[in-house]
Image (tube, rainbow, N blue to C red):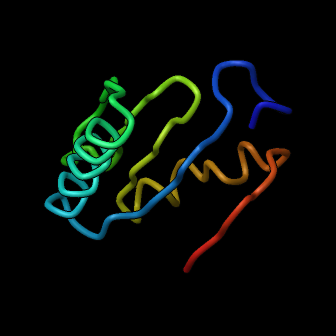
Amino acid sequence: MKEVISFTDYFVICTGTSDRMLDALANSVVDDVRKKYKKKAKKQGNSRDGWVIVDYGDVVVHLFSPDQRNFYNIEELWEDGKVLLRLK
């Protein structure tokens, strides 16, 4: 992303199929990164709204419900960014 925008180097984009899954994914990211890298996150949004952001500055993690991911279509919005890995 650093070729396209100035506020972060990488986006991680993920879909959770329920509020509970989005919460679990967000909490897992925050806990694992804190333990392994000693980095604190800025967390925004909530699972009930279908979009949670975990911001580390150089890496921003977007956790979406399927509906919100389709609505915001973030991959198309930032299509000039390089895709490093895509899993389905």
Q: Position of residue 56 (x, y in %)?
A: 45, 28
Q: State the residue at coordinates (71%, 44%).
A: 77
How many tags in the picture?
A: 0
Residue 85 lies, with reference to residue 9, above or below; the image says below
Residue 6 lies, with reference to residue 63, above or below; the image says above
Q: State the residue at coordinates (27%, 56%).
A: 25
The answer to which of 41 and 5 lies nearer the viewer is 41
Residue occupying the far left of the picture? 20
Q: Where is residue 58 in the image (x, y as percent from the top left)?
A: 58, 28
The answer to which of 63 and 49 lies nearer the viewer is 63
Q: Where is residue 29 in the image (x, y as percent from the top left)?
A: 32, 48
Q: Position of residue 80 (x, y in %)?
A: 85, 45
The quarter of the rendered structure image containing the N terminus is top right
Residue 11 left/right relative to 18: right
Q: In which quarter of the image is residue 30?
A: top left
Q: State the residue at coordinates (39%, 54%).
A: 64
Q: In which quarter of the image is residue 88?
A: bottom right
Residue 6 left/right relative to 58: right
